[in-house]
C-alpha cells in the first residue's frame, strides 16, 4: 500500500452498520471514502479504513 492509497474498507462491515440517526442502511461511496445515509442526508467519513459514525463528523449531502 502506498502513502496516497487509503486502507481498504471491509464491505462486509457495511452489512452490520446502520445510520446512527435513522437506523437505515448505508451506501458505500468508494471514491469519496464515505458511508452515505440517504434517509439522514449525511455522509460519514471512512478514515484509515475505519468508518467514523459520529453525526458531528458527518457532512450534509448536497
Image (spheres, rainbow, N blue to C red):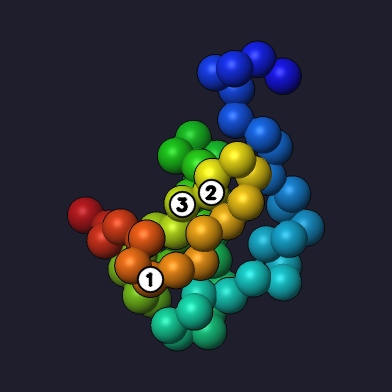
**Quadrant where the C terminus is found in the figure:** bottom left
Q: CA distance from mark 3 to mark 2?
A: 4 Å
Q: CA distance from mark 2 to mark 1?
A: 13 Å
The crowding category of the residue bearing disc 3, from other C-alpha atoms within 10 Å (few below 14, some 14 to 19, many at least 20), is many
Residue 29, horizontal then vertical, whole percent: 51, 46
CB under 8 Å between discs 3 and 2: yes
Query: Is 58 situated left or right of 29 in this image?
Result: left
Residue 14 bears which disc, if any?
none
Which residue is the site of mark 1? 55
Q: Secondary structure at mark 2?
A: strand
Which residue is the site of mark 3? 45
Camera-nearest residue between 38 and 17: 17
The residue at the point 72 percent across, 72 percent down is 16
Camera-nearest residue between 56 and 21: 56
Residue 21, horizontal then vertical, whole percent: 43, 83
Q: Extreme bottom residue here?
A: 22
Q: Extreme left residue here?
A: 62
Q: Secondary structure at mark 1?
A: helix
Which residue is the site of mark 2? 46
* Earlier-in-chain disc, 3 versus 1: 3
Residue 12, horizontal then vertical, whole percent: 78, 58
Q: Secondary structure at mark 3?
A: strand
Using the image, determine if residue 3 lies above or below residue 25. above
The residue at the point 72 percent across, 67 percent down is 15
Amino acid at each position: 500500500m502506498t502513502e496516497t492509497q487509503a486502507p481498504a474498507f471491509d464491505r462486509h462491515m457495511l452489512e452490520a452498520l446502520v445510520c446512527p440517526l435513522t437506523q437505515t442502511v448505508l451506501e458505500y461511496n468508494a471514491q469519496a471514502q464515505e458511508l452515505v445515509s440517504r434517509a439522514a442526508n449525511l455522509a460519514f467519513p471512512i478514515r484509515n479504513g475505519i468508518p467514523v459514525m459520529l453525526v458531528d463528523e458527518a457532512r450534509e449531502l448536497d
